[in-house]
Amino acid sequence: MEQRFIASNAQPQQDAYQTKWQAPSNIALVKYWGKTPPQLPKNASLSFTLSDAQTQTEVRFSPLGAPTKKVTFSILFEGEEKPSFRPKLQAFFDHIIAYQPFLLHYDVAISSHNTFPHSSGIASSASSMAALAACLVDLESQLSPMDEKRKLEKISFLARLGSGSACRSVQGPTMAWGTHPSVVASSDLMAVPVNDIHAIFATYCDTILLVDKGQKQVSSTLGHKLMHNHPYAAQRFAQANSQLAALLPVLKDGNLDAFITIVEKEALDLHAMMMTSDPYFILMQPNTLHIINAVWQFRSETKIPLCFTLDAGANVHLLYPSNVSESVKAFIGSDLLQFCQNRQCVHDEVGTGIKKC
């Protein structure tokens, strides 16, 4: 129990309260894959916060006549009831009730929608849990005022308990999560900003190629569990921490060649862990590999610093400086959209995190 995050002074009120927040997805440059309860990472990770790929969540808190033993809540997603979401949300509320006991005095009505496909390899759980956590802390701040720094820390802390990487979606443009000797104030409990970055990364672009918009064959939750007793787990955790240490000066200096090498290697290392787990599985699709090879050929021929990364799915994130966006988007249209489901992609860029709507 983290005592400093307990809302001991937040007393419920008799008035209803309604609030709406948006939170972006994020794309990890250094991946985390493997965790221990309660949502603590086995290695540190580092990500770009995105801008347009986001979840918008509205919550209405209606006072109850008497407190309940569990949080009373309902969920609408894209305007429809989603019973399949209830177990994860119930587990989330069970985790956080010790930190926000006032929630037992409210009926919590949640309505949420994404600007991108759910469970498609874009971090939908990250954006949705960050947006929900922002709404919850907004109510808490009405009941017991807190400064902006504490609000952001509490949102990141709660978001992590819903989905680990959600803690990295709260601020931006670059966030680190997990205790690491090279990151000031780093913590397993929440993400912290990495502020010392070159100007070129402040406007970096991310085009997400939607290779497969369907549900993943293996969820991230199960994938993390398969890192227990994985034959290469210890080496992978050490490798990720080493890669993060190597990436920090690269982000500071704007060394794009080194950036590309680290980021692409991390993507392939992540999927190598999936392919060598027990049971083993593959989330990449044939078109994922077609895109990767096309990117390598394009970069070799044009010298344009375009690189790829992957999350836990088949979709491909293309990362590139904004000053080459015209050339890259032309290449995407002529060569890569043929590998995307319905020729769809999402053009995005780094962003600053959560916002109140």
Image (cartoon, rainbow, N blue to C red):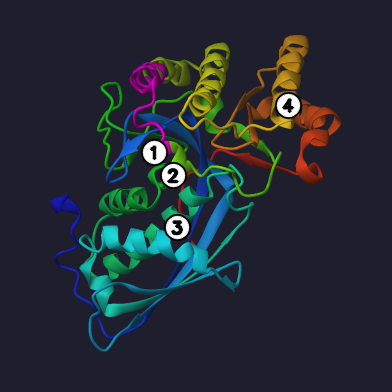
Judged from the image, the secondary structure of the residue bearing numbered disc 4 is helix
Q: Position of residue 94 (x, y in %)?
A: 28, 62
Identify the image quadrant of residue 43.
top left
Judged from the image, the secondary structure of the residue bearing numbered disc 3 is helix
Residue count near mark 1 (Cα–Cα under 10 Å), binned few <14, some 14–19, many ≥20: some
Residue that mark 2 sits on = 221
Outermost right residue:
334
Query: Along the polypeptide, which appears first: circle 1 or circle 3?
Result: 3
Three-letter code, disc 3? Ala
Residue count near mark 2 (Cα–Cα under 10 Å), binned few <14, some 14–19, many ≥20: few
Can residue 137 be spotted in the picture? no
Give the residues drawn in magenta, as a range: 224-244
Q: Does the magenta stretch mainly form a helix, a strand or a loop? A: helix
Indicate which label's residue lies in the foreground, 3 or 2.
Answer: 2
Residue drawn at x 68%, y 26% is 323
Residue that mark 3 sits on = 131
Can residue 271 be spotted in the picture? yes
Indicate which label's residue lies in the foreground, 1 or 3.
Answer: 1
Residue that mark 4 sits on = 291
Residue that mark 1 sits on = 225
Distance from Cα at disc 4 to Cα at disc 2:
26 Å
User: Is 290 above or below relative to 14?
Assistant: above
Distance from Cα at disc 3 to Cα at disc 4:
32 Å
**Marks 3 and 2 in Cβ contact (< 8 Å):** no
Find out whether residue 48 is within the magenta segment.
no
